[in-house]
Image (spheres, grey):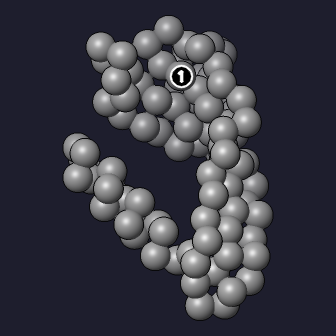
């Protein structure tokens, strides 16, 4: 994967990610308001396109950086503490 820019970049990311799955879901489990950012815990899983094996992935944290009420950047963290540090809510 890598760094993606703009609306087309977001679409490209999801095209690449979804290519691995016959079925896929991502469900937000928790939201934390951090002013100009929102921290979201995401649970995801699906069924492999080739293997057909069902998978439930461990939750991860996304930080949405906002400008004018719109997301302008998304960062992904494995750990809640790292996400909270990134938005200045933890030391």
The picture places residue 30, in percent across and down from the top left corner, at 71, 29
Look at the picture and state if 57 lies above or below 33.
Answer: below
Residue receiving disc 1:
38
The residue lying at 75 percent from left, 76 percent from top is 54
The residue lying at 59 percent from left, 26 percent from top is 39
Say which element carries label 1: strand
**Residue 54 horizontal side relative to residue 35, left or right:** right
Look at the picture and state if 39 lies above or below 27.
Answer: above
The picture places residue 85, in percent across and down from the top left corner, at 59, 23
The picture places residue 57, in percent across and down from the top left corner, at 73, 61
How crowded pointer 1 is (Cα within 10 Å; few <14, some 14-19, many 20+) is rated as some
The residue lying at 62 percent from left, 51 percent from top is 26
The residue lying at 57 percent from left, 75 percent from top is 21
Look at the picture and state if 4 lies above or below 61.
Answer: below
The picture places residue 20, in percent across and down from the top left corner, at 52, 77
Nearer to us in this view, 60 or 16: 16
Which residue of the protein is positioned furthest toward the front in this rendering? 23
Quadrant where the N terminus is found in the figure: bottom left
Look at the picture and state if 45 lies above or below 53.
Answer: above
Quadrant where the C terminus is found in the figure: top right
Quarter occupied by residue 88: top right
| Residue 20 visible in rendering | yes
**Residue 17 horizontal side relative to residue 81, left or right:** left
| Residue 82 visible in rendering | no
């Amino acid at each position: 994967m890598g760094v993606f820019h703009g609306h087309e970049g977001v679409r490209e990311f999801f095209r690449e990610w979804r290519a691995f799955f016959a079925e896929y879901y991502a469900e937000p489990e928790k939201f934390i308001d951090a002013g100009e950012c929102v921290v979201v815990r995401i649970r995801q899983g699906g069924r492999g396109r080739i293997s057909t094996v069902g998978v439930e992935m461990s939750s991860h944290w996304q930080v949405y950086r906002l400008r004018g009420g719109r997301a302008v950047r998304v960062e992904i963290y494995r750990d809640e503490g790292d996400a909270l540090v990134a938005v200045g809510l933890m030391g």
